[in-house]
Amino acid sequence: MDLPSLSDFASFETVLPPLLLALTFLFMLLVVLLWFRTNALMRKYRTFMLGNDAASLEGLLTELTGKYQEQSEILRDLRFALRELEARQERAVQRVGIVRFNAFPNTGSNLSFAIAVLDGDDNGFVLSSLYGRDESRVYAKPVRQGHSPYHLSEEEKAAIQKARAD
């Protein structure tokens, strides 16, 4: 390996000034771009801090954090209340079926009826009214999951089926 000659250094001296000039121009361009960027950020910062100091900004953030926690607790309580209401709603009257009929052959106008009143689990009751010329009778029978432990007439079964179909 040979040592560099003096002529090699001479060519380096001719390339160095334009290279330094290009690097200087590049760095000046970067400085100008950074200056514009910094000014834009400063404008945004001044707008953000307008009328606020660091202490009030910290207080504002603390207040917002407290409100967020309060809203989270309220939302949790509302979810609990909603689940409770949904459970109660399942036990509320949701479906009703009515069937009118003639209980006796010598009466007209379908004055007898059977009404089934059911909740979301098909629990409830069936109420029957038998109308006759001389007397009327009313019967109530419990219904569990769409069935009754008591004998049901065809009209009572039809009322339950109508209620379940809703």
Image: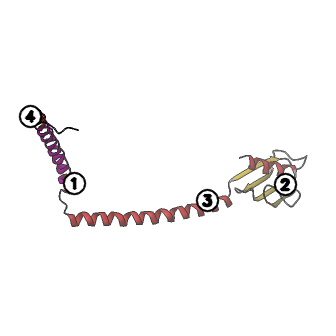
Marks 1 and 4 in Cβ contact (< 8 Å): no
| Nearest to viewer (mark 1 / mark 4) | 4
| Residue 88 or residue 136, whichever sits in front | 88
Disc nearer the start of the sequence (1/4) = 4
Residue marked by disc 3: 86
- The kind of residue on which mark 3 rests is Glu
Residue marked by disc 4: 10
Our reading of the magenta stretch's main secondary structure is helix
Marks 1 and 3 in Cβ contact (< 8 Å): no
Locate the N terminus by quadrant. Answer: top left
Disc nearer the start of the sequence (2/4) = 4
User: Over which residues does the magenta segment extend?
Assistant: 20-46
Mark 2 and mark 3: Cα distance apart in space: 36 Å
Mark 4 and mark 3: Cα distance apart in space: 91 Å
Mark 2 and mark 4: Cα distance apart in space: 125 Å
Mark 3 neighbour class, 10 Å CA radius: few under 14, some 14 to 19, many 20 or more: few
| Residue 10 or residue 102, whichever sits in front | 10
Mark 1 and mark 3: Cα distance apart in space: 46 Å
Disc nearer the start of the sequence (2/1) = 1
Q: Kindly identify the residue that appears in the image at 61 percent across and 59 percent down.
A: 86
- The kind of residue on which mark 2 rests is Leu
- Element under disc 1: helix
29 in magenta: yes
Residue marked by disc 1: 48
Disc nearer the start of the sequence (4/3) = 4
Disc nearer the start of the sequence (2/3) = 3
Q: Quadrant of residue 119?
A: bottom right
Disc nearer the start of the sequence (1/3) = 1
Name the spot of residue 103 as percent of width and height, x first. Answer: 87, 50
- Element under disc 2: strand
- The kind of residue on which mark 1 rests is Phe
